[in-house]
Amino acid sequence: MTALEAFKHHAQEGSPAALEVAPLAERRWWRWWRWWQVAVAVGGFLVLLPGSLLIAIAIKLTSRGPILYRGTRIGRGLEPFTIYKFRTLLADAERRIGARLVTPGDPLFTPIGRFLRKYKLDEIPQLINVVLGEMSLVGPRPEIQHYVDMYSAEERQLLSVRPGITDWASIRYRNEGEILLGASDPEAAYMEKIRPGKIRLGLEYVQRQSLLTDIKILAQTARAIFVPVRGDE
């Protein structure tokens, strides 16, 4: 049974395992916070536009293929959506590797792909997803269907909020590529060393979500991008 089928089953049965997405929109602060995020996303996009144009030109000059990567992710309430990123891999990489994880040493990176990922510059186009209401600035990172189908009933709580550009897990595992580097089986290493922690931090965020928490995460994300990783903090 896939995650979507399980969700529909629990919802029909009235089970507590069904996602409760409505209460979030009813919180007094949520509507204000949502419009504030849209304003920040639009403002951020305009501020980053010159740099984004340079990135777009660099991508086009150094590799064949589109400037943007468009992939399907699973969002709030199990709704699929198209996520936007600056392309960091060769144009046919997804066809060649499928859902396989990519490590920093992978030859599928474009000439500037590693740099874009290291400094999270490839995430800039996701501001479009925020404006469209498919993502938030802060929230559990959206997953592909492959990983969502693995969710337990408890883990499906991650789908009760909009996915975000950043969260506690994004900060904690910002050096994810380095953790997986050298692993004989990156997928197995991810499932053992990274995924459990990501799930735990994501659930903690869902259960304790607040305006103050979101502001803290945004501030620490900005700091993490410019401060070198010092081991496992």
Image (tube, rainbow, N blue to C red):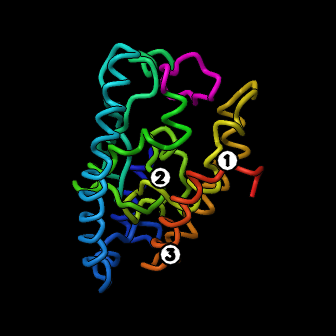
Label disc, if present, on residue 213 of the rendered structure: 3
Estimate the x, y position of residue 168 in percent, counting from the top left. 57, 62
Out of 169 and 156, give the one closest to the viewer. 169
Image quarter hosting the C terminus: bottom right
Along the line of sight, which residue is nearer the eye, 202 or 181? 181
Residue at the spot 61% in from the left edge and 21% down from the top edge = 106
Residue on which disc 1 sits: 194
- Amino acid type shown at disc 1: Ile
The amino acid marked with disc number 2 is: Arg
Structural distance between the alpha carbons of marks 3 and 1: 22 Å
Q: Which residue is mark 2?
A: 141
Give the residues drawn in magenta, as a range.
98-112
- In this view, the residue farthest toward the bottom is 28
Q: Secondary structure at mark 3?
A: helix
Q: Using a 10 Å C-alpha cutoff, classify the residue at mark 1 as few (fewer than 14 neighbours), some (14 to 19) or many (20 or more).
A: some
Q: CA distance from mark 2 to mark 3?
A: 16 Å
Q: Main secondary structure of the magenta part?
A: loop
